[in-house]
Image (spheres, coloured by chain):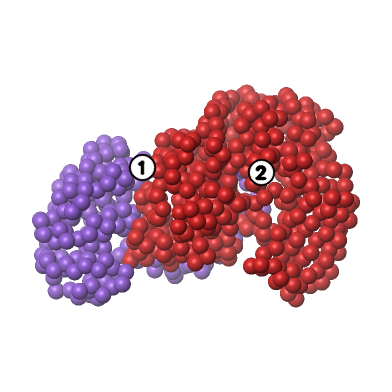
Chain colours: A purple, B red
Amino acid sequence: MNNNPNHPAYPVPVSLPPLAEFLRWLAEMPDAFRNEPYGFPQGRTRTSAVVHDLFETVAAARPGADFLRQFAAAKPNELERNRLRWVLAACHLLWHPALRNRALKGVPLTALEKLFLQDLAMLASVANVDGLFQVEERREELIRRAFETLGLRLPGESEAEARDRLTQVDSVERKRLMAEIAKRQEKLRKEEEVRRKAQEEAASKGPRE
Amino acid sequence: MARKATAQKTRAAKSAGGVPADLRARNPLITPRAAKLLHDMKEHPDAPKWNYTCGDRITREDCEAVAAFRAELFSAREPRKPGAPPLEIVRRIAAQAPHSEWLRKRIGAGVDLVRDWDALPCMTREDFSRDMGYVMPDGCDLDNMYVYDTSGTTGHVLFVPNSPRAVSSYLPLLEFAMARHGVRVKFSEEKAGCILVCAQAHTIAYASVHAVWNNSGYAKVNLKPSEWPKADSAKRYFKDFNPPVLCGDPVAFVELMRQGIPAKPKALLSTALALAPEVRKRLEKHFKCPVIDTYSLNETGLISYACPKGFHHVLPHDLHVETLGADGHAVKPGERGEIAVSGGRNPFVPLLRYRTGDWACLEYKPCACGDALPRLLDLEGRAPVLFRAADGSAVNNVDLSRVLRKYPVVQFRFEQKKDGACALQVRPIPDSPSGWTERAKRELAELFGGQPVNVRIDEQLGARAKGGKVVPYVSAYTLEK
């Protein structure tokens, strides 16, 4: 049973393969999921179509057009490219037979949407997806981040153990910790710069002085 | 030898196309033709007294980004519903969250931005004044930051960082508002595109060009007669440059009309202060063009524009607007609440439910004008208050805010009677050093062209008023007359 008040309150009784199996599955990700997302040079994989197929297979309801639009390249920049590549990797993870055929069947659509819309946007803003292909820890992070949001648990782990392990591999958490160490100095530096620049010539605001 | 060195220096000071290097630094995309236009606007025999220099700082990449923003703005006009923002905005806030201490503290992994939206804490003006360093993202590009100050109606200065790209995105927003009124302007690098008119005792005045508006000329001018070389200079300047777009607040537009300046704009865009319907009608009749009201804050940029049916619609597609009760929860549709905004495009200020201090009812039902974005009904922003100096020239309440923010004032009420007499009641910060009231008195009298101002300390000011609020500006003069 899930006791975390922030966590979606639904039990997921299905037993899953061990972490090693999901790590292997991600390490052997086919080219279709590693390819450049459509909307970028040489981009071939239409991310929104992949998300659509996944949701159609595992979720009780079809994803809305509004939701799917979030997986077409919004801006041709590196951040967006990175985000869509994380999305493709997450689609591949959830395509694992143990998840696709069983475990995900009981997961609410809202939890899946949060993972794809919010958690992956956060993760992509702090971690390069290439790490996924080079470092096992990034693969573990994706697995644990997804499982946390979807309310899934790896075999033999308590909720506290799962959370503890996620904290250890969590890039967002690492970013937070690093920022925490420097935060006071960083705050003062930024505010000093704001005060200094307030005395300087500004850029023309045009008709909004 | 000396002549040769000077020539070399001059050559070095000019970059490609004969545009001086300092001008190119301020306006990276300026063309020789636009530089000539700018020179003509600055050196015109009737030009106002310029007291500031700045440019748009826009690069080619910025220009492309603003063009993409324009394309999205004109196409993304889908209806909204109460509750969480559109998913595009949720996704952007999620991506910003790990990078801003202010957001990090409020958006943890357990928070579902869609599900928990209404429970999220609100950003306030105090967060900006006290913790701007926590609001700003870690590692943001401070070299590309420009800082603007704003005092709003409170008189307390607030520094708001912004980027040239985000600032220039304001222009497509104005284009959109004009297009809704059937006005489409073709901007040219050989003509003035826009003049921002002010009627204040003191303000900055400068001329520039805007790359986003095809390097057309732009000027900010103060209509105060003493800011122009001769009595009829403003008339001749406007006649010669005749910009298709005029921006300003209602006080300035009324002053433009009062001085009989022969402007023939295609649109007047009113900002900063509330535009009363009577004033709008008078201005439309006089200038024979639409007068479009807009609602904007320095902290947030443009929030809404008035459609041809007179309703204020949310303008930027990337901004989420809601109305909140005192408890920070959204009020029901149709109920009045404080306007709060999230999203936007200022890279230095990721807005999350920023409480603006202004009030309205949000209406999601379709509007007869055809714009599907929600409307702010009964928008209660900053009402314009017109004061007059001894010589009859306009004094804006912004001028007064600028003077008063220098002093230890908690609350104040400034009133001008029909005979011109001025009185200021102030509630000072407790235990503040004495002696400042005399200085304030002198400064205010100077602002009003020698008109004495009576200053009275009232430690209880506001304490007797309902909700502790005091109407800060009261004048016997009205814009309608």
2 or 1: mark nearer the eye:
2
Secondary structure state at the residue bearing disc 2: loop
- The answer to whether residue A87 is above or below residue B245 is below
> Residue B306 in the image: x percent, y percent?
56, 40
Chain letter of disc 1?
A
Image quadrant in which you'd find residue B232: top right
Q: Which residue is mark 2?
A: B276
- Residue B94 is left or right of residue B173, and the answer is left
Task: Tell me residue B18's x, y (percent).
Answer: 62, 27
Cα gap from disc 2 to disc 1, whole angstroms: 40 Å
Quarter the C terminus of chain B occupies: top right
Question: Circle 1 sits on which residue?
Answer: A74
Q: Is residue A72 visible?
A: yes
Density class for disc 2 (Cα within 10 Å; few <14, some 14-19, many ≥20) is: some
* Nearest to the observer: residue A61 or residue A105: A61
**Which label belongs to residue B317?**
none
Task: Choose top left, top right, bottom left or bottom right for residue A105.
Answer: bottom left
Residue type, numbered disc 1:
Ala
Tell me the crowding category of disc 1: few under 14, some 14 to 19, or many 20 or more residues within 10 angstroms, Cα based: few
Mark 2 and 1 residues: CB-CB less than 8 Å, in contact? no
Q: Amino acid at mark 2?
A: Ala
Residue B188 in the figure: left or right of residue B386: left
Label 1 residue SS: loop
Residue lying at 33% horizontally and 66% vertically, measured from the top left: B110
Q: Which residue is found at the position 41% from the left and 61% from the top?
A: B118
Name the spot of residue B312 as percent of width and height, x first: 54, 43
Q: Is residue B317 above or below residue A157?
A: above
Query: In this rendering, does residue A127 appear at all?
Result: no
Q: Quadrant of the N terminus of chain B?
A: top right
Q: Is residue A15 left or right of residue A87?
A: left
